[in-house]
Amino acid sequence: MRAFAYERPTSLGDAITLLAEGGSDARLLAGGTDLIIRLRDGSIAPRTVVDLKRISELDGEIAEHDGGLAIGARTVMTAIAADPRIRRDYEALAEGAAVVGSVQIRNRATLAGNICNASPAADTAPALLVYGARVVVAGPSGSRTIPIDAFFVRSGATTLANGELVTSIELPRPSGRQGSVAVRRTRRRGHDLASVTLACAVGEDGVTRIAYGSLGPRPVLVWDETGVLADPSAPEAAKTQLLQTLFTGASPSPRSMRASPDYRLAMLRVLGLRAVGTAIERLAAGAAG
Amino acid sequence: MTASGEPSHVTASHRIDVTVNGRARSIDVAPHHTLLEVLRDDLGLTGTKECCLVGECGACTVLVDDVSVDSCLMFALEADGSSVTTVEGLATGGRLHRLQQAFLDTGAVQCGFCIPGQLIAAQALLADTPNPSRAEVEDGLAGNLCRCAGYEQIIEAVLAAASVTDRPGEPATTEMPARTPATGDRASTPDASVAPQ
């Protein structure tokens, strides 16, 4: 690994200055589970690494905010998967966070880092998309909020501007009751990257939101407002046909080692249908309880 | 300039204070040296193994403030102010830790390379879940690969260690309860592996 200068700012302002001055030669260190791999394999070679973990304004807390939740930039996957509020109201995010890497990875990896790494296969991204999460960022010209769907560009690329960093991720209060779930397909049980990763939320208003990843350069959000997917009595053939239409934007890479495009597309339809079924069941169970 | 062609200020080392296996240490570390490298090369604690270096195998697992981490994916500087436990810190008072004893008694150690990481991951699991189910052991150790494929015995060992009650002043015991052989009832691989447990 090439040597670099290590900076450990204690204020957000200092971090932004270091990041803005360093430009592409400065990289942020949160959990490090992606960064250190890329430093070691030489795919990045920054002159400065800015460790965010001593910045007083950034925390690892999950706070109630504006009727929803705000997840601090240093919050690790283990904390998200275990949080009772997330498990209750944003179940797909808890499930997505619970399958990132291994126990050891989840103890270090942050949600903010996961979205900034912007892997198309990130297991938290589909859940954040179906819940309409907002990314709160700070930079040289102040703070702004980016809808998660406008955040991802392609693997490793986001709409963060030079000098900007993520300070928190907000989950808005659901507009009504909903049932949600995250599912994925991997080559092996346990610790693996997803060949298909998907989240689904069915609302009591009949709107179904589905987001899927690992089928193109970035995770994709689609939705159905016809009520067909959310209807427990709608025929499976109708749902399958509708899903087929919704998934036309999927473009899995033919170069991936994990699964062929045909397999991924087939599994996308299977997992999509299953996730809709589970989300409907959870919505009904929530209504009964 | 250094051998790598970097200005010397870039490679300047930083002093960190860490407690390693109960002993306070003050060490000068280079920013780009991982906790794994410092444990092995600077402190001579070679029980922690270097293997995949991408966070897949778990051979480098250590506890940092009682939380299990892959030490190959953490800079030593990030451990500044922390307490680190390696496999060398498990046995106390000349007696094996109950997990180590259980691994021996169960025949869970084949080539041995993955075992330090397995032991530390198991220690973290039992600290959170003192009486884990078999499925919880499988999930808890999913980040630790064994290329001898000795998983059955490793899982058996962790379950056996969990059933041993620590007696005061006796962190280990050689008396292991008899266990029912594995019944082969391992859950089939689910397609949607994040369904509720």
Image (cartoon, grey):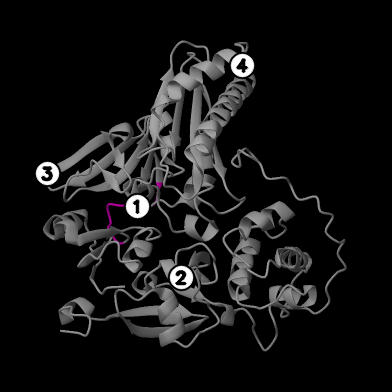
Q: CA distance from mark 4 to mark 2?
A: 48 Å
Q: Are marks 4 and 3 on the same chain?
A: yes
Front-most of residues A254 and A38: A254
Give amino acid for label 4.
Glu
Give amino acid for label 2.
Ser
Q: Secondary structure at mark 1?
A: loop
Q: Position of residue A161 (x, y in %)?
A: 18, 45
Disc number placed over residue A236 in the picture, else none = 4
Q: Badge 1 is on which residue?
A: A59
Q: CA distance from mark 1 to mark 3?
A: 22 Å
Q: Quadrant of the N terminus of chain A?
A: bottom left
Q: Badge 2 is on which residue?
A: B71
- Tell whether B119 sits left or right of B174: left
| The magenta segment | A54-61
Front-most of residues A81 and A189: A189
Q: Where is residue A149, by image quadrant?
A: top left
